[in-house]
Structures are given as C-alpha cells and as structure tokens.
Amino acid sequence: MTKFKVNGSASGVLWEGLKLYCIYFPKYALYMAFPVLGQLFGLFWVFGMTYLFMNNIDYLSREIPMLGSLGPMMACVMLITLPGLILWIKAFWDYLVSYGALNSMTEAAMSTGKIYDFPAHNAVITRRTFQFITLWLIFSLFTAVSSIPFLWVLGLIFFVYFVLIFQVFTFEEDVSPSGCFKRSLMLVKGNFAKTLAMMTVLFALTYYFLEKGVSVIFDALRITRLLLGMFEGFASMIPMDGVNSVLAMANSPQITPLDIADVIIQMIIGFLVVGFTLPLRSIVWTLWYKNLSDRDGVPAKISKSGRKKLDPEILKRAKDKDN
C-alpha cells in the first residue's frame, strides 16, 4: 500500500499532489472521461444537428411543407437536439459532483493506497445534493460579482481564501454551505501567500503550459487540421458582416470562418486539459486542506488512532468488491 507523507511546505504539497496524480492517473482519467467528454459530445450533437438541419432546410421544407413555418421548424430543431442536451446536462452535473468526489478519492488513495468504485465517492456528495447545489449557487454568485472589472483584485483575494470550500464540504458534513466559505477563510488565514503561490503554479501548469503542449501534439498529429475543416463550415453560418464592417472602419483585420474555427479548437483543447487535470487541483487542495486543518486543531473525520477515516459506505462497498 502506498503511503503519502506531506510536509507543511507549499512545495511539498504540490510535489506530493503531482506524484499522487501520476500514480493514479488511469483511475482519475477514467472517472473524468464522461464528465468531460460527455459535455463535448453533447455540445457537438446539439450544434452538429442544428448545422445539418439548417444547411438542408430548403430541401426539407420542399419535402415536408410544414417545416416552412417557424413553429414546426423550431420544434423539429428542439427534438433532434434533445439527446445531446440531455447528455450535456448529465455530464455537466457529474462534473460539478466531481469537485467533491475527487476529494474523497484522494482520501481513499492516501489511506488505503487504492481508489475504490466511483459511485461510492459520488454518494459522499449526492446524498447532500441540496446543500451541494446551494454551495455552487453561492460560489456562482460570488464569481459573477467578482467578474465586475473594478472588483477583480478584491475577487481574486477572496477567491484565494475560498479555495478550500469543496474540501470543507466533503470532509466536514456538519458545516453549512455558507459555513464552508467561512471555514475555508479561517483555514487559509495566515497562509495566504503560500496558498496564492500554489494557486499560481497550478494555474500556470494546467491553464497554460499543458494546454500549449497538447496544442503542439494536436498539430503534430494533424488533428488540428482535421478539426479546422469540420468547424470552418459551421463557422461560415455565423453572420459576421456587421462585426467586419466595424473592423474595416478601424482598419483592423477581418474575422474569417477559419479564425472562428481556430478559436473553437483552442477552446476544446483548453476544456480537455482543464477537465482532465481537475483531479490534480483537487488532490493538491485536499492535501493542503489536510495540512491546514491539522494545524488548526479541528481535523475532519478523526478516528481514535488519530488518522482520518474513510466514509463507512466507501469501506463497505470496497470490501464487497474485494470479496
């Protein structure tokens, strides 16, 4: 069984988090496959079916005259895109749940050296669905307010203080959704500089360097060229005459369907990288939470031996699976 001992330094937490992520990468990647790829495939279905339908609307309206009316046409679009929308909603919900379940998986990896069945870790969060949704609503409201330009600096400061809210929610079940923010603030208080440094490293690694690396791989494997051909046709349907007229008056370069297709591809690459590295960020913040909560003197789920204990449901299901 692999044991992880983390020292109190920020660099030590980052290093151990990276090691844990690499050792259990197959498990984490498998867990994130549906939340990440499901959202992409769902959106591809929605926009792809819409593109095919609108691209053939003249032929379809001749064959089915009722499609010449706006109402039946919109109803048909909604019907053919519904499967993709349902897939996207399910994958999006699973992605939100992963913000808590990944913390439970990290605890399992540290305590037992294994990551057991995913539904048990999801259940740690979904059995408190209402509180979890409330937590996300509060966090979304905070993010929306922080996006106002003159509040960016203040928002960044509080974002550092609130970075452990999902760890608090996972490991301290008696804390309310709003209390998760207060608890995270109290844990980070006095460790702001270290937390900010860790956040900066994680942001640079997962939002920049890895994204650039994957872009190079896509170019080398000619995946980018293939995707450009696919998305250029879709981008040609976007009306850009008004925007290009303004750009022409400002003597700026015109926006072409190829430019739009390239932006879409970069967004896809960024989403893939950020999605599949979510476990790395969750691992690091779980280790940091454990470190700070031990210092704080109020560690979560402590047994008589002084070690954190896993959720009983996870242990029960793991035992059944081993048998």
Image (cartoon, grey):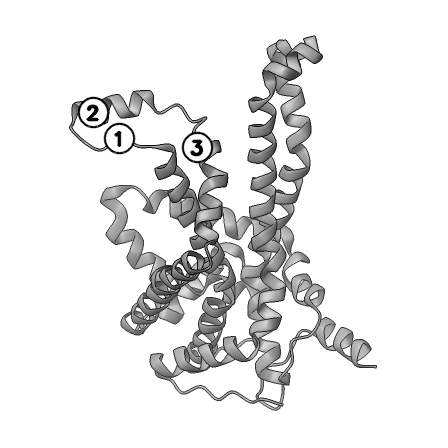
Camera sees residue 175: no
Q: Secondary structure beneath disc 3?
A: helix
Please give the label number shown on residue 248: 2
The amino acid type of the residue labelled 1 equals Gln
In the shown orientation, is residue 78 left or right of residue 235?
A: right
Q: CA distance from mark 1 to mark 3?
A: 14 Å
- The residue drawn where x is 56% and y is 23% is 55
Q: Secondary structure beneath disc 2?
A: helix
Q: Earlier in the sequence, mark 1 or mark 3?
A: 3
- The residue drawn where x is 54% and y is 60% is 99
Q: CA distance from mark 2 to mark 3?
A: 20 Å
Q: Position of residue 4 (x, y in %)?
A: 51, 87
> Do the CB atoms of the residues marked 2 and 3 lie less than 8 Å apart?
no
Q: Nearer the viewer, residue 241 or 129?
A: 241
Outermost residue, right side: 323
Q: Secondary structure beneath disc 1?
A: loop
The residue that label 3 is drawn on is 235
- The residue drawn where x is 38% and y is 33% is 257
The residue that label 1 is drawn on is 254
The amino acid type of the residue labelled 3 equals Ala
